Image (cartoon, helix red, strand yellow):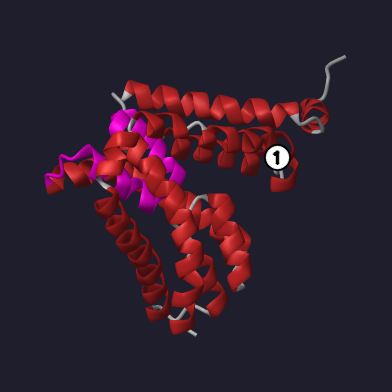
């Protein structure tokens, strides 16, 4: 007597372990593709993993809440992983102290441009106010961005998607763009990508150069604070 594959699948999906394994496997495949291409930025492992998981969920008719029961374990580890960014920052602390003013200027400029440009483009396309509120914190790390979005009256789920898209896009274009512009200072490169593309961009910076990764970490962290202060003020100009 043969078992019904549909029944087996239904049984497996009831446990969170399946989706945890699926998430880790998808990322492992994405990382394998990334390594096979010689770490080319366009073969971003997060983007590949998202595409694989999205296809799996659609193909199996699984809703996100069911998937997240298992993926929440990976989500929980984002906190400790972010804290670990303090290690390369501590190693480069003397260099950061010598560049306090350029770091401050770059952070303020980056935060302002990220918020104002997104809102101006969205307003130009006639998007509603809740869409603007969802867009404003797109360059900030996800937990902070969602909190800002809720405070401004945005849609947290839309904000989460925009944050992911911003990070992946930034991680893909950052290396070829900086090479094209002739920007050779790893401090400036790291600070820029951390400010514009939060955690995913910072991960890319760490893959390329440890100094860039350290400055990306400080850019990501301080940009979250600045955006929380700047976004509500800028939003008033677009009401």
Image quadrant in which the N terminus is located: top right
Q: For this view, does 165 lie left or right of residue 14?
A: left
Q: Which residue is mark 1?
A: 67
SS for dot 1: helix
Q: Is residue 234 at all visible to an observer of this figure?
A: yes
Determine the residue positioned at 28% across, 56% down.
106
Determine the residue positioned at 51% across, 63% down.
228
Most frequent secondary structure within the magenta stretch: helix
Where residue 137 appears, x then y in whole percent? 48, 62
Determine the residue positioned at 77% across, 25% down.
5
* Total numbered labels placed on residues in the image: 1
Q: Is residue 116 above or below residue 159?
A: below
Give the residues in magenta: 182-211
Residue 81's quadrant in the figure?
top right
Q: For this view, does 10 lie left or right of residue 130?
A: right
Where residue 7 appears, x then y in whole percent? 83, 29
Where residue 156 appears, x then y in whole percent? 62, 61
Determine the residue positioned at 41% across, 41% down.
217
Q: Per the image, is 195 magenta?
A: yes
Q: Is residue 71 above or below residue 218?
A: above
Question: Who is closer to the viewer here, 134 or 53?
Answer: 134
């Amino acid at each position: 007597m043969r078992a019904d594959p549909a029944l087996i699948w239904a049984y497996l999906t009831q446990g969170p372990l399946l989706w945890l394994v699926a998430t880790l496997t998808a990322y492992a495949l994405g990382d394998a593709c990334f390594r096979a291409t010689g770490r080319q930025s366009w073969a971003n492992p997060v983007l590949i993993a998202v595409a694989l998981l999205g296809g799996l969920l659609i193909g199996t008719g699984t809703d996100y809440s069911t998937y997240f029961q298992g993926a929440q374990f990976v989500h929980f580890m984002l906190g400790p992983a972010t804290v670990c960014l303090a290690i390369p920052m501590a190693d480069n602390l003397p260099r950061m102290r010598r560049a306090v003013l350029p770091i401050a200027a770059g952070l303020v400029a980056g935060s302002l441009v990220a918020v104002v440009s997104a809102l101006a483009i969205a307003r130009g396309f006639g998007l509603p106010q809740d869409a603007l509120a969802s867009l404003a914190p797109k360059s900030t790390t996800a937990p902070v961005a969602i909190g800002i979005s809720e405070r401004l009256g945005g849609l947290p789920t839309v904000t989460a998607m925009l944050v992911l898209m911003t990070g992946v896009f930034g991680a893909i274009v950052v290396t070829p763009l900086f090479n094209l512009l002739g920007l050779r200072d790893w401090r400036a490169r790291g600070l820029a990508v951390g400010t514009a593309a939060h955690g995913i961009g910072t991960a890319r910076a760490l893959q390329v150069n440890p100094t860039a990764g350290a400055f990306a970490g400080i850019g990501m962290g301080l940009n979250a604070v600045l955006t929380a202060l700047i976004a509500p003020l800028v939003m008033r100009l677009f009401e």
